[in-house]
Image: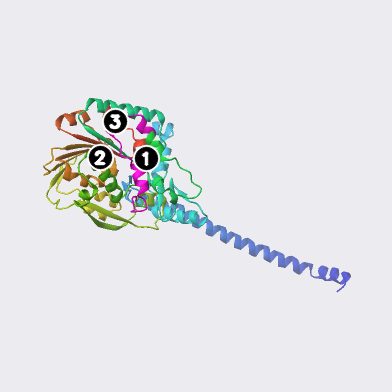
Amino acid sequence: MNTDDKEIFLEENEEDNEEFYDFRYNSLKKKGAIVSLIMIWLFCFIIFGVAGLHFLTADSDFSESENRVLAEFPRLSAATVADGSFMRDFETYLTDQFPFRDGIISLKTLTDRIVGKNEENGVYIGKNGYLFDSQTPLDKSFAKKLGKAVLEFKNKHQDLETAFLLVPNSSYVYSEYLPDYLETDDQRWLIRALHRQMEDDSILWPAAAKILKSNADDAQLYYKTDHHWTTRGAYLMFKETALSWGLEKDEKSIDKKFEFYEVSNTFEGTLASTSGVHDVRDTVEICVPKKSEGTYVVNLESSGEKTASLFFKEKLKNKNHYEVFLGGNYDKVIITTVSQSDRSLLLIKDSYANCMIPMLTPYFNKIVVIDPRYLTDSLDSIIKENDFTHMMYLYNANTLFEDSSLIPCLES
């Protein structure tokens, strides 16, 4: 067909072509309208459906998966609306109480990992199944204030044999498993910097960073999914402290007195919950002094509960299996033992101490455990009421560097 024939053909079929294009246009327009309508209905379903679920579902007070208290519906008033606090708190409330929140977090984490992201909500996704908490830096002014408070307290109570056990994070001990790009502070030097603020030959400073690092290949010293050390890690430092205090003459003497039992192999800690990574399950062990049944009484003073065990196995039914140790955190716990020793211990601590406390019971006739974060009594009054011979501070570095309660506790 030559050029003239094409032009004649197009002119003859121009009316048919217009009808064809009108049909195509109307067809596409209808399809577009249908797609738009579907998207609008889907959007409305998501918005109003989720909103309906949100308001039909009862709010939760506590998140077991994240081990924290959830936000409550904020107080509505003219003042809170005017200063903007209502909207900020309401946004937090919606985030905390969002339906299917845990599943959405896990889905987001999976998506991020597919594209190579190795950090979720401040948790670093490391190698060999390890999850790492971000490190808290040591503030110089805080270090000076804490050092001063500890030294002044020691000067007031010079008769107490005092140990300061400061435990590094897993990111220091297992640094080889950190993501390749990540650079963290050397917590050994941060701990030494704090130590220099309270130089005193009468205060024992077990070399936790050095000892844990050098034994990291011999046993799992930290949980992979949680920020705590394991019972094996605590036992390692318990032996070091016991030998330094002269509680036993050698390691073999200590090892003969204790047995380890596995109580869980399905533990998923706070780092797994916060990050949404659920690839690994941790094993939880307890360390029990041999023939310890009936050898001590535990008084959880704030709740008025008394028990003959430091292990709360019913906590293994909950999300946080670490609460098998002591049942959680309390302001003051008084442990009275049948030990023939004339030693008694004041233990100032965070939750890292909970798995070590059973190891201490054969060596002290009384142990008073204080968590300054919850304490309302005066520490001096507690000392006056008890004839302590030993005192131990036991903290994780992150907790201590963030803690605002220890200094007032020592100064009260």
Q: Name the mark nearer the viewer: 1 or 2.
A: 2
- Asked which quadrant contains residue 49, the reply is bottom left
Mark yes or no: residue 412 visible. Answer: no
Q: For the residue marked with disc 1, what is the amino acid? A: Asn
Mark yes or no: residue 233 visible. Answer: yes
Residue 209 x/y as whole percent = 36, 42
Give SS at disc 3. Answer: loop
Rendered image: mark on residue 398: 1
Residue 94 x/y as whole percent = 40, 45
Which part of the image, by quadrant, shows the C terminus?
Answer: top left
- The local crowd at label 1, few if under 14, some if 14 to 19, many if 20 or more residues have their Cα within 10 Å, is many
Residue 98 x/y as whole percent = 40, 50
Could you give the CA–CA distance between mark 1 and mark 2, rounded to whole angstroms?
25 Å
Q: For the residue marked with disc 3, what is the amino acid? A: Asp
Q: The magenta stretch spans which residues? A: 193-222
Give SS at disc 1. Answer: helix
Q: Name the mark nearer the viewer: 1 or 3.
A: 3
Give the answer, above or below, for where 180 lies relative to 32: above
Does residue 62 appear to the left or right of 111 in the view shown?
A: left
Count all numbered tags in the image, as a single digit.
3
The verdict on residue 174 being magenta is no
Rendered image: mark on residue 43: none
Could you give the CA–CA distance between mark 3 and mark 2, rounded to whole angstroms?
13 Å
| Camera-nearest residue between 219 and 372 | 219
- Sequence-wise first label, 3 or 2: 3
Give the answer, above or below, for where 304 lies relative to 105: above
Rendered image: mark on residue 244: 2
Does residue 185 appear to the left or right of 265 in the view shown?
A: right
* Residue hosting label 3: 201
Residue depicted at x 44% and y 50%: 176
